[in-house]
Image (tube, rainbow, N blue to C red):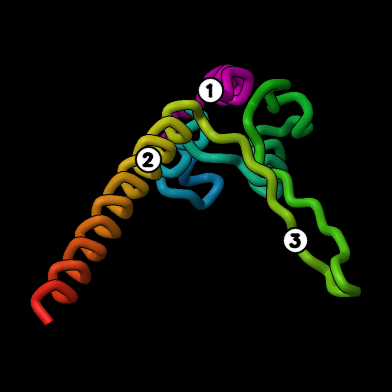
Amino acid sequence: MNEILKKVRTAKGYSQLEFSKLVAMDQTTYSRKETGKTFITEKEWERFAKTLGVSKEEIKDKIAPQAVNENCVFNDQLVGIQNISLPVEVLETILRYNKKLEEDNALLKTEKQSSKDNVGKSS
């Protein structure tokens, strides 16, 4: 959760709805950003800070998850590499889903092999 952003916003007297309109963002989108469910880009931090009349450093939590896009060169081509922090719940859901897909894939491979074996026996 972006506690500092929330504190500054409320101290300035803005509700989430009022503030989201000022920064040209849907209230639900802003809410997800403020609660840490989605990431806040550097441009959004700048827009929030300007609207609140503070520097972005004043409103950013030190531990708030952020998307970081570092550019690097690979084979003389500029390649964007994106490192992001995910909430633990999201990562756990992805890992469970991946495990389920791997199990389903193994079952399908077994069924396919069994089907091939049965066709070969009947020939």
The numbered mark at residue 26 is none
Q: Nearer the viewer, residue 118 or 15?
A: 118
In the rendered image, residue 73, in percent from the top left (x then y), is placed at 88, 65
The region drawn magenta spans 1-19
In the rendered image, residue 60, in percent from the top left (x then y), is placed at 70, 27
**Residue at image x 75%, y 61%?**
80
The numbered mark at residue 80 is 3
The numbered mark at residue 1 is 1
Nearer the N terminus, badge 3 or badge 2? Answer: 3
Instruction: Answer few, some or many: residues within 10 Å of disc 2's Cα (few below 14, many 20 plus, some between 14 and 19).
Output: few
Three-letter code for the amino acid on which mark 1 is drawn: Met
Q: Quadrant of residue 50?
A: top right
Which element type, helix, strand or loop, lies under badge 3?
strand
**Residue at image x 83%, y 69%?**
78
Q: Is residue 38 left or right of residue 93?
A: right
User: Which mark is in front, 3 or 2?
Assistant: 2
Alpha carbon separation for disc pair 2 and 1: 29 Å
Instruction: Answer few, some or many: residues within 10 Å of disc 1's Cα (few below 14, many 20 plus, some between 14 and 19).
Output: some
In the rendered image, residue 22, in percent from the top left (x then y), is placed at 53, 45
Query: Is the residue under label 1 in contact with that under label 2 (CB below 8 Å)?
Result: no
Alpha carbon separation for disc pair 3 and 2: 29 Å
Nearer the N terminus, badge 3 or badge 1? Answer: 1
In this view, the residue farthest toward the bottom is: 123
Relative to 108, say whether 16 is above or below: above
Q: Nearer the viewer, residue 89 or 104?
A: 104
User: Which mark is in front, 2 or 1?
Assistant: 2
Query: Is the residue under label 2 in contact with that under label 3 (CB below 8 Å)?
Result: no
**Residue at image x 13%, y 68%?**
118
Q: Dot 2 corresponds to which residue?
A: 99
Nearer the N terminus, badge 2 or badge 1? Answer: 1
